[in-house]
Amino acid sequence: MKDDPDNQLIQATENTFSPSTSAISSNLSSQHLISSQFSEPPSKRPRQLKLFGLTKVNELSDSEINTINKSLIKMIVADYQPLSLVENVGFIEYSKKLQPLYSIPSRKVLTSQLLPQEYNVILLKIKSILQNVNDLSITTDMWTSDSDKSYITVTCHFIFDDQLYSPVIATKSVSDIHTGQNIAATLTNIFNEWNIANKIITVISDNGSNIKNAITEHLLKHHHPCVAHTLNLSINEAINDNSDINQILKKCRTIVGHFKHNSNATEKLKDFQLQMNLSPLKVKQDVPTRWNSSLIMMERLVNIKAPLSATMSTLPQAPNYLNESEWEIILDSTHILKPFQIMTAELLSGEKYPTLSVVIPLIRGLQHNLRNLKTKTDIGDVFRNMLMGIVSRRLGILESNKIVAKATFLDPRFKKTAFDLLENASNAQKWVSGELKMIISKNTEMKNEMNTTVSTTAHSSNSTNDATKSLWEHFDNKVVQVKTTLSPNITSALMIRQYLDMPLLDRRKNPLEFWKQHKHTLPDLYKMQLKYLCIPATSVPSELI
């Protein structure tokens, strides 16, 4: 599902504005685009120069200057342009050709006036929306800048007007001592500034012990580990514990490194590919700590095997080449790792639709794929079995996690069907039912209070009808008893049954559209999904800064 540019939010961070291009871009840009929801709508047609009598206007109005300034800010932020752009001779000349009367603001004006002004406008708009949001989730990530300063970025996720939003609300510098207490203090300040501390359902981060300690021990919030990080840990564990796979990867890196540092070898590889009527492809260097880059490296070697073999045979002082059994192990490894790459892409591909609810079906699909994968080598089979065990240990438990289970059950694409074990599906329904009863009970109490108020008011203002009312008192009391009996237990069961009886939504559809259409037929379940379908499966939104 493609992101809709009109729905992208400007990141609203709490940094002070500095000359750093990346910092300012982080402050105002999310997903590369600035949202038209938070910006002034463009004029319907370009404004022409006005003529007063026979004299051409020789200056722009404040409104026209403001409009162009906003467009300039959008371009800088959306395209991650350096602030020095406004000092470039070519850009200045280009701007003059477009609008000779416009004076480009200086870099100082951008950082001290225009960017802070736009930031404050967006800040107020997001805060205004958050006042109408009851539940949200948080993703957070700690990172280090090029100047070795430590920062923490916080993104909040919520559903508003049946759309999922993920604005960055803060990027703050943190103490060099990254204790749980220090991290918690920074997060507390951020939550208080935005008045969201009591709205947080869960906080998603990587598996670092300090951030987990800050969230669970100091903030007393529920912590959900980033599924993408957990996948990464699982694969790295399997690779590191398999000496045969490690040795082959080292051999691949040596071959790739030879071509990366030898232009003659690279040119010969290209020549052989052209002779074989193949599109020229270069080798890909991996980063040992990133398994997906190792997969890409191996896949590229497999793709260019024939021209690579021909090239290696002609190179003097060429590194040791791969034998056929090693090629088969590489092929097994790519087939084993490919489903992990696809799952990671699924989890990271969308910020405009729920992802936590897809975790259980993706894990089950991954396990099914690994179980049924036929390997050609014993080493490949050992690698496959090792990964199956690690995935089951690290990720299999998520099916019995209350928050993940509720999110899955409330996703009309999955409901109870996504669960591997019937017991886990039943537990998910039980947990949703229990919370639904509390929602209905609370709603009933509020309605009864309102009815009591209305009844008291009517009684005091219409005492002449007391005789008539006494005749209906017995019946009215029975009606109240019936309503009390139906709520909340029976009402909860009926609503869940109605939901489960509906056909599953196509898994390629956006579940938020389903709930938008059924908010009046399933009102209390609708309220629940606002709470759980806003939770992302990964902390990556906070890592994209």
Image (tube, grey):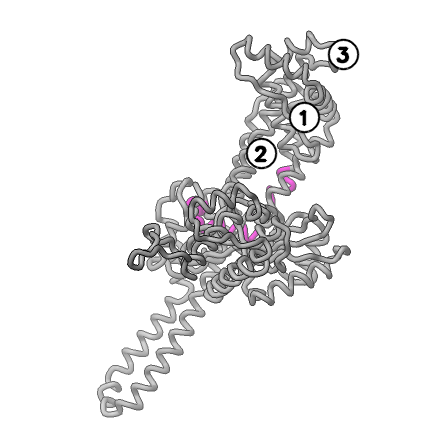
Side of 452 where 327 appears, left or right:
right
Question: What residue is disc 2 on?
Answer: 340
Question: What residue is disc 3 on?
Answer: 317
Q: Amino acid at mark 1?
A: Val
Judge whether residue 264 can be spotted in this image. yes
Q: Amino acid at mark 2?
A: Phe
Magenta extent? 391-416
Identify the main secondary structure in magenta: helix
Mark 1 or mark 2: which is in front?
2
Q: Farthest residue in the bottom direction?
A: 464
Q: At x 60% / y 67%, what residue is drawn?
A: 192
| Mark 1 burial class by Cα count in 10 Å: few <14, some 14-19, many 20+ | some
| Mark 2 burial class by Cα count in 10 Å: few <14, some 14-19, many 20+ | many
Q: How much space separates mark 1 and mark 2, taking CA atoms?
A: 17 Å
User: Residue 108, percent across and down?
Assistant: 60, 56
**Toward the viewer: 426 or 48?**
48
Instruction: Choose the circle earlier in sequence order: 1 or 2.
Output: 2
Question: What residue is disc 1 on?
Answer: 382
Q: Image quarter for residue 255?
A: top right
Mark 1 or mark 3: which is in front?
3
Mark 3 or mark 2: which is in front?
3
Instruction: Choose the circle earlier in sequence order: 1 or 3.
Output: 3
**Toward the viewer: 47 or 1?**
47
